[in-house]
Amino acid sequence: MPNNTAGVELPEYFIPCRGSIMDYYRQVVNNRGWKNYLVTTYNDTYQGYDNVFKFRAELNERIPFDYDAKLREHIVRKSNIRYVNHGRDGMIEKFFLQDHHTLLHIICSKRVDTLTLMHRDEQPDKQIDEWLTIKRKYYYE
């Protein structure tokens, strides 16, 4: 099992961010020095977008609603805001357009379990329809 630079043991599906696309984004996203990242890449080849908000609005219409996954993500986020974000631990999320067809949703977290609980039992690569794909990768530094 890998360890991040803070010495925390990580699950085996975490990969190092050095030498990857995260080298370009981690300095912008992470101003607190946290070590764990979840990068969700949405690739929509059907149409192009010039705005993060338009892309996100389209995703809400096209991705089927999964009640259990949304409820789990909501509970993890709310408990993180209520109990964790008061100076001890936390979570930062940012959205970036990589190109007109690719949206990156980057979550940076101090705690590893926050990221693993939010998307437990999710497939790392998911094909929504013939044009929309979702890829999740976990990084550490």
Image (cartoon, rainbow, N blue to C red):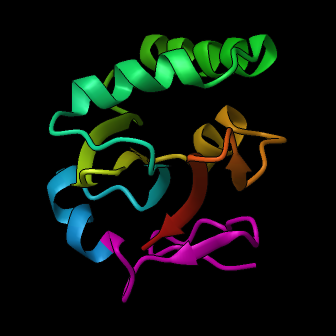
Identify which residue, 116 or 111, lies in the foreground: 116
Residue 56, quarter of picture: top left
Task: Give the x, y percent position of residue 42.
Answer: 47, 47
Residue drawn at x 70%, y 48% is 127
Q: Is residue 9 above or below residue 42?
A: below
Q: Is residue 73 left or right of residue 67?
A: left
Residue 139 shows in the view: yes
Task: Give the x, y percent position of residue 94.
Answer: 28, 39
Magenta segment boundaries in residue numbering: 1-22
Task: Give the x, y percent position of residue 30.
Answer: 24, 53
Residue 5 counted in the magenta span: yes
Q: Is residue 39 left or right of residue 33?
A: right
Question: Magenta region's main secondary structure?
Answer: loop
Residue drawn at x 47%, y 26% is 59
Q: Is residue 63 above or below residue 103?
A: above
Residue drawn at x 34%, y 74% is 21
Residue 1, quarter of picture: bottom right
Total marks in image: 0
Residue drawn at x 75%, y 17% is 66
Residue 77 shows in the view: no
